[in-house]
Image: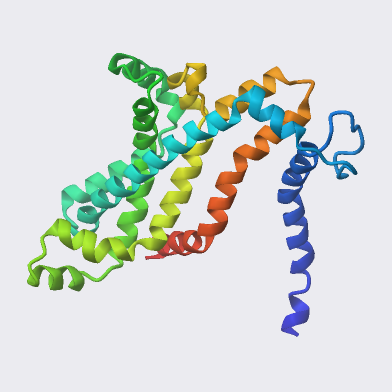
Amino acid sequence: MKKKSGIWRLPILLVIFGVYFSPFYILAVISFKPVTDLSSRWKFSSAPTLENFQTAIEQGGILQALMHSFVIMVVTVVLIVLVGSLAAYPLARNQSKWNKVIRAFVLGIMMVPPLSILVSLYSIIVKMGGVNQYWGIILVLLTFELPQAIFLYSNFISSIPTALDEAAALDGCGPVRTFFLIIFPQLKSVTASVVILAGIHCWNDYQFSLYVLQSSGMRTVTLAISSFFSQTTSNLNAASAAALLAILPVVVCFLFLQKYFIKGMVDSAVK
């Protein structure tokens, strides 16, 4: 009876899968189609070509943009993991009045729409000389991604028994050494969640990069694709190839870390 009662779920799952997968399928189909192929976008070409990818790389500068996005994402994510976990450790271990105020403040920052302070933020970055600089966009992304990391890490660390800290203290470990040797190795699942969430946000960032990285030589992948789409309105195939190249790194990253991501999100929310 239980097996029969669950049969209705399969069609619903197939419909949901089709809705989410169809845009990626059409994107892949168009990317490998010759420009002269005017057949249905649901149908793979009988003569697939890589010419669209070549056009995207040579004319759109996608590889250079991918490199810029990769550098920005890696540096930002590493800083988020280090600073976020270190900041969350005392917040989770010391349940003082001021720490509760700080945690509430962190939650409040998460609710502020980034675009609402874009003008003042841009003015500050200009005065600091951060326009068209790696550190400028990294500083902005770090500011907006840290609250989420601190929130996830503090919830997860709260579930780790304090007896481990006490045992480490008896062995002569200070707070910093206790964190890196005892606590941090247990944060693999939540770290994977932070890496994926922050990494995707950094990779897909457009609003901040548009203002901070104004030079054409500093374009990230989102800026390069936006510019390429506007330049190649008559060549949708090449634009689709550029978009496909842009999403592949984050898709591969998620596939490798999805097990830890799901576990980390559940543990951080429940514990």
- The quadrant of the picture occupied by the N terminus is bottom right
Q: Can the viewer see residue 107 in this picture? A: no
**Number of labelled discs?**
0
Q: In which quarter of the image is the C terminus?
A: bottom left
Q: Which residue extends farthest bottom?
A: 1
- x and y percentages locating residue 51 in the rendered image: 76, 32
242 up-or-down from 214: above or below: below
Q: Position of residue 68 (x, y in %)?
A: 47, 31
For the point 56% across and 25% down, which residue is it? 223
Residue at x 27% of width, y 45% of height: 83
> Is 268 left, or right, of 37 in this rendering?
left
Instruction: Name the quadrant containing residue 95.
Output: bottom left
Q: Is residue 212 left or right of residue 162?
A: right
Q: Position of residue 251 (x, y in %)?
A: 59, 49
The answer to which quarter of the image holds residue 126 is top left
Q: Is residue 271 visible?
A: yes
Q: Is residue 12 left or right of residue 117?
A: right
Image position of 87 with respect to 64: above or below:
below
Foreground: 131 or 44?
44
Task: Say left or right for 69 vs 172.
Answer: right
Question: Which residue is nearer to you in this view: 194 or 92?
Answer: 194
Residue at 31% x, 16% y is 129
**Of 122 and 95, which appears nearest the observer?**
122
Q: Is residue 153 above or below residue 124?
A: below
Q: In the image, residue 141 lies at what x, y percent?
A: 39, 34
The chosen color scheme is rainbow
